[in-house]
Amino acid sequence: GKRERVHLVETSPRDGFQNESIRIPTHIKTELIDRLSRTGLSTIEPTAFVSPKWVPQMFDSEQVARHVVETHYQTSGNSSDQKINFPALVPNVTGLERALASYGGSENLKTVSFFTAASETFSKRNINCSIERSLENLKQVIELANSHNIQVRGYISVAIACPFEGATPPEQVAQLAETLIKMGCFEVSLGDTIGMGTVKTTAKLIEKVSQRVPLNQIALHAHDTYGQGVANVTKAAELGIRTFDSSLGGIGGCPYSKGASGNVATEDLVYVLEDMGFDTGVDLELLAETGDWVSEALDMPYGSKAGRAVLSQ
Ligand code: HMG
Ligand code: MG
């Protein structure tokens, strides 16, 4: 029979790179995106339109976005046909306006991702405002996005635990998730920003959130700090989640949460989800070659065990 599709959102060029302390040259970022686009991935988050004063790595969002549009979009007349969605991360209307300008308008920019947090302290540290104020920003972002037919994804950071406030009450996340959907986000991505989640806390979170938001509008954004990313994703898949954020080679972290390591590795998810009977649409070997290439290009160890295993066969 036909296998059920799971949707992987590749975040290495954005979440992966934003935490690297070395300034990564733009041509490596764009080559990574080009290589990723040949692996079968259907969504790649290429960059963030945040303040480069806060996240210096995002100094070249404009160039990266322009490259994506020039290389991966076939535009004829005023319709643009693209197989891969390239959502840009934006924290506010300024970010959305920058994204619109660099993508060359809304025929190319189909989706943006907005981010808020489940704890006040994390919100303040990450985006320099309260959760309430960030929801006002979201309202403005959705208004402008809607007028351009752009859909908005909503991330909730520290959905399981906060580095400053400790364990996050799942009901608090569930209410915020419901608010985001009611405001007009098409999907909420639950961010385990510091990777403290376990099978138990992930299941509890999904149980609570799914009482307020349909399962097909919930994504899991697992970080692998405690090595629990794969376990948490498989648990979430068993519970009916079908969208997972991940990062090639597990690269990355978060600049405002000390000690957070990268997202769960895309290669590891492809390996286990395919074994569970899902169709990821992704070629694991091509992915592993890309992971190996980027690790070498950045002089970092290649962090995906599944990727290393595939290459050594
Ligand atoms: P702020 O300084 O509080 O903003 O920054 P402001 O509104 O007071 O404006 C101050 C200056 O910033 C002004 O410029 C604005 O124009 C400018 P000035 O007049 O001083 O020259 N500004 C901007 N510049 C560029 N792009 C913008 C923008 N907005 C205002 N969009 C802001 C507020 C949110 C911009 C800032 O705090 C920021 O950029 N923070 C970075 C947050 C970030 O990128 N975090 C990492 C991504 S989130 C994440 O990783 C979590 C996730 O992966 C899920 C998970 O794991 O949990 C998604
Ligand atoms: Mg993240």
Image: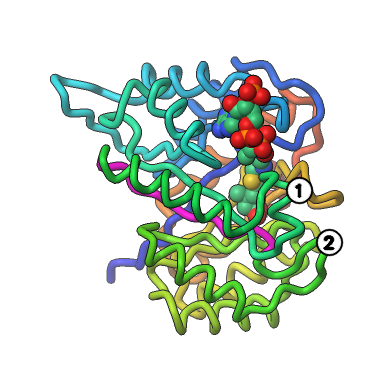
Q: Is residue 193 left or right of residue 185?
A: right
Q: Is residue 189 above or below residue 89?
A: below
Residue at 52%, 67% (x, y): give it.
Answer: 275
Q: Is residue 170 above or below residue 113?
A: below
Q: Is residue 11 left or right of residue 223?
A: left
Considering depth in this image, is 271 or 232 the residue closer to the camera?
A: 232
Please name the amino acid that badge 1 sits on: Arg
Q: Is residue 153 above or below residue 56?
A: below
Q: Residues within 10 Å of mark 1 (few under 14, many from 20)?
A: some
Which SS class for mark 1? helix
Q: Earlier in the sequence, mark 2 or mark 1?
A: 1
Residue at 28%, 71% (x, y): give it.
Answer: 1
Q: Which residue is mark 1?
A: 125
Position in image of residue 290 (x %, y %): 59, 33
Residue at 63%, 78% (x, y): give it.
Answer: 170
Q: What are the residue bounds of the magenta stretch?
A: 149-158
Is 117 magenta? The answer is: no
Position in image of residue 112 (x %, y %): 43, 42
Q: Which residue is mark 2?
A: 164
Position in image of residue 155 (x %, y %): 54, 55
Position in image of residue 55 (x %, y %): 71, 31
Considering depth in this image, is 234 or 139 the residue closer to the camera?
A: 139
Which SS class for mark 2? loop
Considering depth in this image, is 245 or 119 the residue closer to the camera?
A: 119
Residue at 25%, 23% (x, y): give it.
Answer: 74
Please name the amino acid that badge 2 sits on: Phe
